[in-house]
Image (cartoon, rainbow, N blue to C red):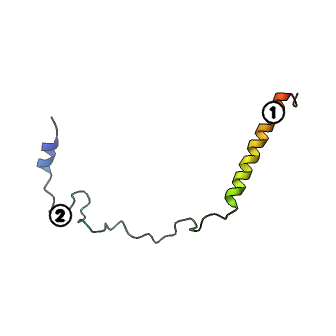
């Protein structure tokens, strides 16, 4: 047995043209949804051109150092 029939009996019919949960007419902007006027916390132009390349080089160096460590360990340099 579902409670849909019981729920409808206790709730009044919503006004025509209004959503019962938000009480906003179609095409009307809700009061809490204003325009964004605060700063968004980031620059619009993006990072400097060299920044991604610096990260790629830094990650590449870490990978090369790790590979050199394992190769050195494999050939017995650290014994």
On the picture, is 9 further left or further right than 50?
left
x, y percent for residue 5: 12, 43
Residue located beneath label 2 in the image: 17
Mark 1 surroundings within 10 Å by alpha-carbon count, few (fewer than 14), some (14 through 19), many (20 or more): few
x, y percent for residue 53: 70, 56
x, y percent for residue 32: 35, 66
Look at the picture and state if 68 lies above or below 48: above
Confirm or deny contact between disc 1 and disc 2 (CB under 8 A).
Answer: no
Nearer the viewer's eye, disc 1 or disc 2?
1
Could you say which quadrant of the image residue 63 lies in?
top right
Look at the picture and state if 54 lies above or below 45: above
Q: Say which mark, if any, is on residue 38.
A: none
Question: Which residue appears farthest toward the bottom when viewing the image?
Answer: 37
On the picture, is 46 further left or further right than 39?
right
The number of numbered badges drawn on the structure is: 2
Look at the picture and state if 51 lies above or below 10: below
Q: The residue tagged with tag 2: helix, strand or loop?
A: loop
x, y percent for residue 54: 72, 56
Look at the picture and state if 21 lies above or below 38: above
Depth order, front residue of 31/45: 45
Depth order, front residue of 5/70: 70
Depth order, front residue of 16/7: 16
Residue located beneath label 1 in the image: 71
- Please identify the quadrant where the C terminus is shown: top right
| Residue occupying the point 57% across, 65% down | 42
Could you say which quadrant of the image residue 25 lies in?
bottom left
Q: The residue tagged with tag 1: helix, strand or loop?
A: helix
| Residue occupying the point 13% across, 56% down | 13
Could you say which quadrant of the image residue 16 lies in?
bottom left
């Amino acid at each position: 047995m579902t409670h849909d029939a019981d729920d409808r009996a206790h709730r009044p019919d919503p006004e025509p043209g209004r959503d019962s949960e938000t009480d906003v007419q179609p095409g009307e902007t809700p009061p809490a949804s204003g325009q964004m006027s605060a700063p968004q916390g980031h620059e619009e132009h993006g990072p400097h051109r060299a920044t991604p390349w610096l990260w790629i080089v830094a990650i590449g160096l870490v990978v090369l150092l790790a590979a050199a460590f394992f190769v050195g360990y494999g050939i017995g340099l650290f014994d």
